[in-house]
Each structure stands twice: as C-alpha cells, then as structure tokens.
Amino acid sequence: MPERRFVLSLVLGIGIAGALLLAWPGAFAQMERLSYDVRMRLTALPSRADTRIVVCEIDDRSLRDLSRTDGIDWPWPRELFGEVVRFLREGGAKAVVFDILFDSPSRWSPGDDAAFASALREAGGVVLAATFSRAEVPAFADERIRRTALPWPGMPGSAPGFRSASPPVDPLVSASEGIGNVTPQADEDGVLRRIQPAVRLHGRMYPSLALATAQVVHGRRARTTALWRSLTLGGGTVPLDDDGNMVLRFHGGARAYRRVSILDVILSCRLRLEGKPPLVDPASFRDAVVFIGATAQGLYDFKATPVGGHYPGVEIHATALDNLLAGRAVRDETAGLPWLLTLIVPCAALAVAAGAGARSLALSLGLWVLLVACVLGGSAWAFALGLAIPTVLPLLAATTCYAASSSLHHLGEARQRRQVERAFSHYVHPEVVRELARDPGKLRLGGEEREMTVLFSDIAGFTPIAERLEPQAMVSLLSDYLTEMSEILHAHRGTLDKYIGDGIMAFWGAPLPQAEHAVLACEAALDCQARLRAMGPSLAARGLPPLSARIGINTGWMNVGNMGSRMLFNYTVQG
C-alpha cells in the first residue's frame, strides 16, 4: 500500500471511530463493560479463592427451621449472634465479620443489645457493618464512629463523599473491633465491579467492611496508606483505579468460598452446652475469617456482578477482603497503554488490508479474524495476570481503519480496471482485457525488456489502387481491410499497436506473457492471407480490385511499455 493510502486510511479510520464514540458513547461504554465481564468469567478460578475465608450463611433453611421450632422470626435476637461469635472465636477464627446492619435497637428485649455487646467485647475480633448516605440527616452525629476513621487526609482519585452514616447502635460500636461501609456502588448498568476501600464523611476517611476486616487480620497498627492508584496494607500493595476504587477480582460464581449454615453453628452451640458432639467442629474455623451474612432468597441481599446476576452481597465483601489480603485486585489500565494499542492495532489491521488484501479477499478476512483473535486472546491473557486493558476502542479503530483501507483499495482497483479497459480495449482481445482487469498487477507499465514477436503488414500496391479510387471508396476499402485483419489479430491474442495508413503493427508477448508468441504471430499471418483471398469475390462485386498483403514477422528482445512524451504516449514496443 502506498504511504499516502496508509496515512489516509489511518486518519479516516480513527476519525470514523471517534465520530462513532461521540455519537453513541453509552453503547460503546457498555460494550467495554460486557467485554470486561466476559474476561472476568473466563479467568475466575475458584481454586484461587482464599481458603481462610468462610461464609456463615443465613440461608432459607435457617430462617425456616428457627421460625418453626423456636418461634424466632427474622430479625433474630442479637444474643443469638453473640452465641455464634463465641463459638467461632473459641474455635480459633481470626475475625468475625457481620454483613448485617444493627443500626437500630433490638426489637426483642431491652437487654438484647447489651448482651450482644458483651459477647463482642469478650470475643474480640468482630467487625460490624454501617451504611453511608448522601442525604443530610439533621440528628446525625459522627462521634460514634469517629474512632474507626482512617489516618488519611484523603483518598487518591475522587473517593465519594457522604453526608451521613448509619452505624451500629451505641453499645455495639464500642464493643466491636472495627466498623466498615457496606454501601454498594454499582456501575451505570447496575453491575457491581468495584468497591471503594474508603469513603469520605465530614472530612474524614472511613474504611469499607473489607478494609476494616483486613486491618483486624493484620493488626490494628498495620500500616495502611493510599497513594495514587494503589493502596498499601500491611506491607502489600493493591491497585486502585483513577477514582480510588478497587476493581474486584472474582474467583468464580456464588459459593467460591466455603459455606457453613448458621443454623448448624447455632445447633452446635446448643449441643455443646448439652455435652453432645457439635454438628460443626469449631476447630474447622481455626485462623479463618468468617463472614456472617444473608443468602436466603427472602432477605434480598443479592447483587449483579460480572460472574453472575444473583450474587450474595456477603460474598462480595468476602471477595474484596480476598483481594486486599492477596494484593490481587484488577489493575484497570486507562492511561497510556489503551491509547498506544489504539494506534498499534489499527496499523496492524492496515498492514493486513494492504498485504493480504492485494492478493485475496478471503486471505485478508482470515488474517483480520486472526488479528482480532490475537487482540482478544492477549486481552484475556493480560486480564488473567491482573491487568484490564480496554479492547473495544482498539478493535473499533482497527475495524474502521481496515474497512477504510479495504474500501480505498477496492476503489483503487476498480479505477485501475477501468483505466486498463480503456487503455487496451482497442488493442487486444477482450479476454486479455478481462484478465488484465482482474489482475492489473500483471501489467507493468513504464518500459520492460522481453522476448516478443512483432508483425508488420501493409497492402501490396496500395498507392496505385488509392489513386484510381474516389476518396469515399478508398476509405471504405481501407476500413473493411483493417477491420478484417484486426479481428484476426485479436483472435490470435495479438496486441494491436497502431495503423499507419494501410499498414498494421501488432505484437505478441505483452501486456501478458505468451510462451507461444511466435507461433501465434505466424498463425495470424497465415489467417490474414487466407482472409484476403476469401474477400476477393466480394471486392470484385463492388468493382474493387483484389488485395494482397505483405507481412513481416520478427522475434527478439525488445522494450515494451508506455512510451512517448508527457503529453502524448502509447503502449508500444521498441527495439
């Protein structure tokens, strides 16, 4: 492809891609999100989930059986959760995390909250949930949760700011080891792909439930700092996006983490008091981080995620903790690399269109599909390594550039075919013209040395004949002669060079190579002589004399091509 066409295709393709993005920004953003979700599902491996994380689920069975046998309906007495906390901590659980809101007093008894707080204080290592809101609540005061604020002046990027919070009730705040935000922040399509490790409230930064838990796991004094696009926690670093969010790396659909029904834990507590073997061995929770949250359908704590549209909210917080502890969140690359790919991939597409497109449309399309597969495969491979690279924009630019290049190529080919047809339709056999039009590359203009055969002929004694005839009769005779001879030359695949009065010049071996050029010229000469003899009776009937031709043929090396001046040239031979 000429440099001009390459640059024109690149500019045109990227310009069209930019116009499409400006016209439908939401559609392409959603395509990118869907591409992200596909890559997440392809690389989400349950084997990578942290086995120390356990979900103690409040499932439908737990709700049903406690209501049926004990008459306990949801929400349950908080003293019951206190028993669960004691059981888990006595078994060696490193932390117990509640994805349940205790932001209003218990409905069961005045002492229920105090009993729960006593259990939390006694067990230690418990993290509770709070929600944050952008609504101004007149009665809200943040003194209750101020002790849980992070020692940061701010958060990199644009961490969301809130005006109020709903922390646990007073006795529970002081009894807990930490309090974390559980307010979901889904993307525009309603899918939850990221969380805020910290949020801003009245000039202070407060941790998410996962970050508060990670601090408990590492120890409250673990160094936690937030820098540009990264979060350092206990010596490990977790990538953040431009807005200070942590892009979650899921490890499969629901049940990526070990689940234990809270009903079995409650029954195990009771069996131990009776001196009987528990249903669940408390030692199975040694060094575990246990999340207590709802998976029951009736409690409606499900979120849409890249790995499923019905994902328990408690497992989202478990996934976030997993990412924080392992330092394996997704790095959402939006800086220089995507723009570099937006130039490299279209250039590769143009190379495909230029190289393969000139040979075969099928080959070009095949290589184009291979290029797209390489981009998608490379993107999935990078995603498996933890790097999310936008793919829609590079592929969109590559597609428009490929289409622009192919269109310009085919328009150029069509124009070249028309030029070939105009240039040779009067010189050579129509079949030769069609072959040249199908593959103009076979035509090399500008002078080329070849072994060819050239034929010259004229009418013997034409001058005396012309002097005896009226001008109109002479023109008619010459026209009939040249027509008959030219048809024979074309029939033998000769190239008609020029007429010189009654003379004819033709050659073989160009513009298409002909191995049998000498034979074709000789056969054409014999047929011309035979045709002249056959024309004798018809000429005599018109009162015209018979004609005989003198024909000369020579085979040798000669130059062929467009020759002449800049103002006037024709396709001929010399030599």
Image: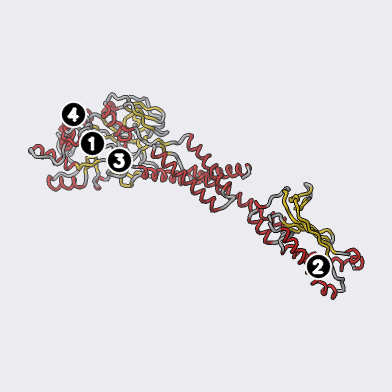
Residue 394 image offset from top left, x and y in percent = 49, 42
Q: Circle 1 is placed at which residue position?
A: 290
User: Could you tell me the amino acid type at mark 3?
Assistant: Ser
Q: Circle 3 is placed at which residue position?
A: 47
User: Could you tell me the amino acid type at mark 1?
Assistant: Val
In which image quadrant can residue 211 be found? top left
Q: Nearer the viewer, mark 4 or mark 1?
A: 1
User: Could you tell me the amino acid type at mark 4?
Assistant: Arg
The CA distance from mark 2 to mark 1 is 104 Å
Tell me which numbered mark, 2 or 3, is placed earlier along the sequence.
3
Q: Is residue 8 left or right of residue 308?
A: right
Q: Circle 4 is placed at which residue position?
A: 121
The CA distance from mark 4 to mark 2 is 118 Å
The CA distance from mark 3 to mark 1 is 19 Å
> Vertical placement of 88 versus 222: above or below?
below
Residue placed at 76% from the left, 55% from the top?
A: 555
> Vertical placement of 401 versus 320: above or below?
below
Point out the image quarter for the N terminus: top right
Q: Regarding mark 1 in the picture, which secondary structure is present there?
A: strand
Q: Residues within 10 Å of mark 1 (few under 14, many from 20)?
A: many
Circles 3 and 1 in contact, beta carbons < 8 Å: no
Q: Regarding mark 3 in the picture, which secondary structure is present there?
A: helix
Q: Circle 2 is placed at which residue position?
A: 480
